[in-house]
Image (cartoon, grey):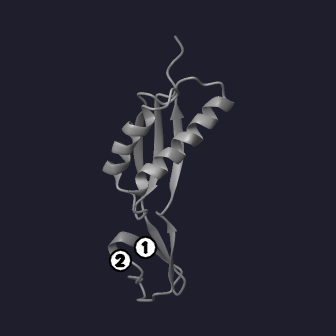
């Protein structure tokens, strides 16, 4: 399960950002996850609870997930198309000379902190 390793990396990154900004508590993190990244959302959510509650800064924090739609580009006809629906074969011209533009990445989009008391 590579989701646990991803979660540990994200938490370490968020803790570092929090420290650099004198933040003691993080209430939520929004991750953007590519549609074809191979990351299983339910697994990453389970791993989050396990790992976040072991961190003073992250304890009790929520993980929010936004999916990045996968888009492939065809070099032959220079058009973009939906990756999941068509795979590597361009639906416009039939070429296999294609590459993924977006949809395989994972990004920390937002880090939320509680409102000051």
Foreground of the two, 115 or 22:
22
Foreground of the two, 111 or 71:
111
Residue found 35% across the figure and 77% down from its top: 86
Residue found 47% across the figure and 51% down from its top: 5
Residue 68's quadrant in the figure? bottom left
Near mark 2 (Cα within 10 A), the count class, few <14, some 14-19 or many ≥20, is: few
Looking at the image, is 11 positioned above or below residue 84? above
Question: Residue 43, how many percent across, how many down?
Answer: 33, 50
Marks 1 and 2 sit apart, C-alpha to C-alpha, by 8 Å
Question: Residue 47, how many percent across, how many down?
Answer: 38, 44
Foreground of the two, 40 or 99:
40
Foreground of the two, 62 or 47:
47
- Point out which mark residue 86 bears: 2
Relative horizontal placement of residue 44, taking residue 11 as reference (left or right) = left
| Residue lying furthest top | 117
Looking at the image, is 103 positioned above or below residue 90? above
Q: Are marks 1 and 2 in contact (CB under 8 Å)?
A: yes
Dot 2: element = helix
Residue found 40% across the figure and 84% down from its top: 89
């Amino acid at each position: 399960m590579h989701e646990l390793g991803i979660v540990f990396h994200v938490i370490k990154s968020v803790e570092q950002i929090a420290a650099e900004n004198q933040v003691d508590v993080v209430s939520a993190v929004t991750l953007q996850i590519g549609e074809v990244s191979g990351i299983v959302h339910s697994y990453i959510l389970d791993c989050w609870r396990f790992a976040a509650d072991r961190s003073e800064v992250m304890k009790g924090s929520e993980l929010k997930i936004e999916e990045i739609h996968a888009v492939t580009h065809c070099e032959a006809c220079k058009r973009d198309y939906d990756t999941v629906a068509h795979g590597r074969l361009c639906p416009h011209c039939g070429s296999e000379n294609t590459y993924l533009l977006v949809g395989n990445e994972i990004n920390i989009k937002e880090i939320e902190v509680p409102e000051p008391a």
